[in-house]
Structure formats: structure tokens, C-alpha cells
């Protein structure tokens, strides 16, 4: 599976997880979600932290998915697609890290 596809799927999974937690449908747990000492204080803090992180994860997916589709559609199948995938995967990880910082700060506030 091309790295571009992995980056797109990962960014969408992160967005779905954040959206679900922000709406109170993903309860506080030790396996899935933005888990820091501050975000895991209680259910309300968990939900508010994910609400704060939601714009970051939405922006990340909103950039990574169209860029990935464009990379695939433009015919970058001659070796450049892996480079595009690496960049998009790095953007996904960076977006997740920024979202975690935003969530942690919101939980502490």
C-alpha cells in the first residue's frame, strides 16, 4: 500500500477519533484518544480537550487527503509518489502532535 494512502487513512482515522471524543461518543479510556495526564482527568476535560484539538485534526485531514488524491491522480507513480507519501505522513504526524499540545493546554486551562 503506497505511503500516500497510509497517510490519508491515518489522517482520517485521527479526525474521526477526535470528532467522536469531542462529541462525547468516545469515553475516557486508556487506549484511544489524546491521552495526557491533563486530558485524562475526567470525562468533561476529556471531551473539552478533544473539542479544542478538533480544528487542528480537521485542518490536517483537509490538507493531507486532497493532496494525497492529487498526488495519485497526477500520475506520480514513477517514484515520486513515495516522496509525496513521506511528506504527507510527516504532515499527519505533525498535525497529531500539534493537536495533542492544543488538547493538553485546553485540559489544563
Image (tube, rainbow, N blue to C red):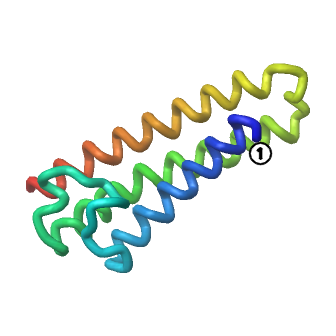
Query: Residue at coordinates 66% horizontally, 48% vertically from top-left?
Result: 65
Position in image of residue 50 (x %, y %) = 31, 62
Relative horizontal placement of residue 28, taking residue 86 as reference (left or right): left
Query: Residue at coordinates 13% horizontally, 54% vertically from top-left?
Result: 38
| In this view, 37 is above or below 16 | above
Position in image of residue 52 (x %, y %) = 29, 58
| In this view, 85 is above or below 48 | above
Query: Residue at coordinates 36% horizontally, 39% vertically from top-left?
Result: 97
Quadrant hosting residue 5: top right
Task: Give the crowd class for mark 1: few <14, some 14-19, many >=20 residues within 10 Å.
Answer: few
Query: Residue at coordinates 29% horizontally, 75% vertically from top-left?
Result: 27
Q: How many marks?
A: 1
Which quarter shows the C terminus?
Answer: bottom left
| In this view, 102 is above or below 22 | above
Residue closest to the far front: 31
> In this orientation, which residue lies closer to the viewer: 43 or 49?
43
Relative horizontal placement of residue 49, taking residue 60 as reference (left or right): left
Position in image of residue 100 (x %, y %) = 30, 46
Position in image of residue 68 (x %, y %) = 72, 41
SS class of the residue under badge 1?
helix
Which quarter shows the N terminus?
Answer: top right
User: Residue beneath label 1, please?
Assistant: 69
| In this view, 13 is above or below 24 | above
Amino acid at each position: 500500500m503506497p505511503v500516500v494512502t497510509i497517510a490519508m487513512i491515518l489522517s482520517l482515522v485521527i479526525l474521526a477519533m477526535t470528532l467522536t471524543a469531542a462529541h462525547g461518543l468516545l469515553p475516557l479510556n486508556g487506549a484511544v484518544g489524546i491521552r495526557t495526564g491533563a486530558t485524562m482527568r475526567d470525562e468533561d476535560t476529556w471531551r473539552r480537550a478533544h473539542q479544542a484539538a478538533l480544528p487542528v485534526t480537521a485542518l490536517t485531514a483537509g490538507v493531507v487527503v486532497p493532496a494525497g488524491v492529487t498526488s495519485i491522480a497526477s500520475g506520480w507513480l514513477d517514484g515520486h509518489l513515495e516522496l509525496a507519501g513521506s511528506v504527507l505522513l510527516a504532515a499527519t504526524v505533525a498535525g497529531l502532535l500539534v493537536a495533542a499540545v492544543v488538547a493538553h493546554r485546553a485540559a489544563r486551562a
